[in-house]
Image (cartoon, helix red, strand yellow):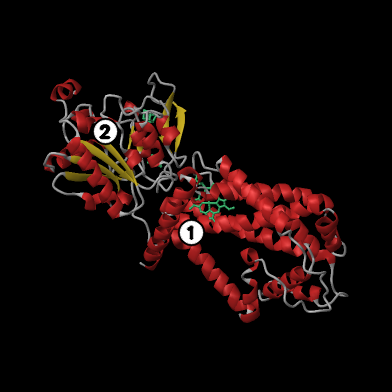
Amino acid sequence: MATFSLKRFIAILFARADAIFNWSFGQSLNPLVCLGALGWFFFWIVAASGIYLYLFFDTGVTDAYASVEYMTNDQWYAAGVMRSLHRYASDALVLVVLIHMLREFSLDRMRGKRFFSWITGIAALGLVYACGITGYWLVWDKLAQMIAISTAEWLDALPFFGEPIANNFLNSATLSGRFFTLMVFMHIFAPLFMLLLMWIHIQRHSQAKVNPPKPLIFGTSAMLLALSLLYPATSQGPADLDVVPTDVGLDWFYLAGYPLLNVIPGGQLWLFALAVFVLLALLPWMPPTKPVEPAVVSLDNCNGCARCFDDCPFSAITMAPRSDGMPYSAEAVVNLDNCVSCGICVGACPTATPFRRANAIVPGIELPDHSIFDLRNRSLAAASQIEGDARVLVYACEKSAAEALSSANVTVVTVPCVGMLPPAFIDFALSRDLSDGVMLAGCAKEACHYRLGNTWTQQRIDGERDPYLRKRVPRERLALSWLPNKHKQRQRALDEFVATLRELPPMDKRRRSERE
Ligand code: HEM
Ligand code: SF4
Ligand code: SF4
């Protein structure tokens, strides 16, 4: 319950922030819908600037500080700017990743079988911090000294190390370059592992967004550059192990946890960190999800067209060589581990049409718990309940809470995702006079619970993606409502639609019978 209400609260905050960003920049340039892609972009800036810095960096503990000072002061126009870009892009990276994590949590896009991106994301986040902290260490200034000592003391609270690591940092005489060299290695190899993890992170996504739109690339780059020129990254005076560093400035994006080390004993802090980690790792199963049957292919009805493969947002379909002797080159195969039962593949399949004879309605692919046959029957039953002069059949995604829209002249038929609805159903409802209008109610654009359901639906209706909504369908009798879970706004959109339908001339009976 607690996670649910927290989720709802964060989701409402995001919906509000989305509204502001959409209004200011336009929907596709809303940075909140490209957080993962921005993460990738900032990673590339950090990697490129890091490679440049490495050319001038002295990896020995005695000369590291001087080499960083040289870059910052003597070569401020090149290596200095690169240092600042490296720092600010790292800050931006951790910021967008934390917001990305919160957003995915609030949209519930990590539940059950979707745990994969969540768990790999947590590992990637750990590496983001490992990279950032070791990076601050390499400057070997007073801040690095504070980090080195605090980290060593914290590690010493674990019962694994014989010789206390903190002994390395007792004074200048005991300082060994050993640990420093280890940090240099970690700072170089951790980003490589991170890149690998970032790649693994999106392996259960098709068409993952890893590049932000160009205006966002230019805008964020300009901001980072301006920040680098106005407030160049600097060091905090050379480390001196004979003097305890005081008043060091912290980078709160990476080092916010360090003050805790002064107030909480190391052992208790390990327990706290472990508890946070376990809680985060268990979130996809809190509470456990109800098992839903994955999509099933009916080879008798599959012609191997690969539209389901193109549209599945979760890389759950592969096209395999034909196994049943039918004269087609391929057949669809569902990967049961990846399939999240969204039904978007069903909406893509050309054989999923209500116009077929009722006893022949078995498409090439479908969800056993939400068959097309059942959807047709539910549409017919729902239509038989609506009355009045502007009857509306609403097809709503289960996440949209649109059931509340039902009234005398409106009935709602739910589907797991609007992307599951083959466009032929809209044609069917209007041409068979099941209703005077059809409304599709789904998640807000770019915030689709199943990633691409509303995008594909919009493209199918606009004739940009197979299967198209046929041209003969009167578009003025179709309303699309892509909204966050906001009942009032949805109701208003529906009322406006009903009012428009009332203004339209009655459906042409002759054309209607021609359609039939
Ligand atoms: C280096 C850090 C990270 C990067 C670069 C990154 C990037 C991405 C990208 C590009 C996507 C696909 C977006 C789309 O096309 O729909 C994604 C999805 C996702 N990420 Fe991350 N991510 C990172 C860290 C995290 C973290 C820390 C978490 C949470 C612990 C997380 C959880 C998720 C989830 C749950 C999804 C959606 C999975 C789904 O739709 O089934 N990510 N991420
Ligand atoms: S139900 Fe969704 S996840 Fe499963 S195969 Fe179809 S499109 Fe992919
Ligand atoms: S969309 Fe339908 S017909 Fe085409 S490959 Fe997939 S299951 Fe087969």
Whether residue 477 is visible, yes or no, is yes
Q: In this view, does 70 lie to the left or right of 101?
A: right
What crowding class fits label 1: few (fewer than 14 Cα within 10 Å), some (14-19), or many (20 or more)?
A: some
Please state which of residues 313 and 469 is positioned toward the viewer in this rendering. Answer: 469
Question: Could you tell me residue 230's position as x and y percent?
Answer: 71, 57
Q: In this view, does 54 lie to the left or right of 231?
A: right
User: What residue type is disc 1 on?
Assistant: Leu
Question: Could you tell me residue 227's position as x and y percent?
Answer: 67, 56
**What residue do we see at 50% from left, 63% from top?**
280
Q: Mark 1 = which residue?
A: 102
What crowding class fits label 2: few (fewer than 14 Cα within 10 Å), some (14-19), or many (20 or more)?
A: few
Instruction: Note whether ligand 3 is within 8 Å of mark 2.
Output: no
Question: Could you tell me residue 121's position as x and y percent?
Answer: 54, 54
Please state which of residues 34 and 7 is positioned toward the viewer in this rendering. Answer: 34
Q: To which quarter of the image does residue 94 belong?
A: bottom right
Q: To which quarter of the image does residue 459 belong?
A: top left
Image quarter hosting the C terminus:
top left
**What residue do we see at 33% from left, 48% from top?**
292
Q: Mark 2 = which residue?
A: 476
Image quarter hosting the N terminus:
bottom left
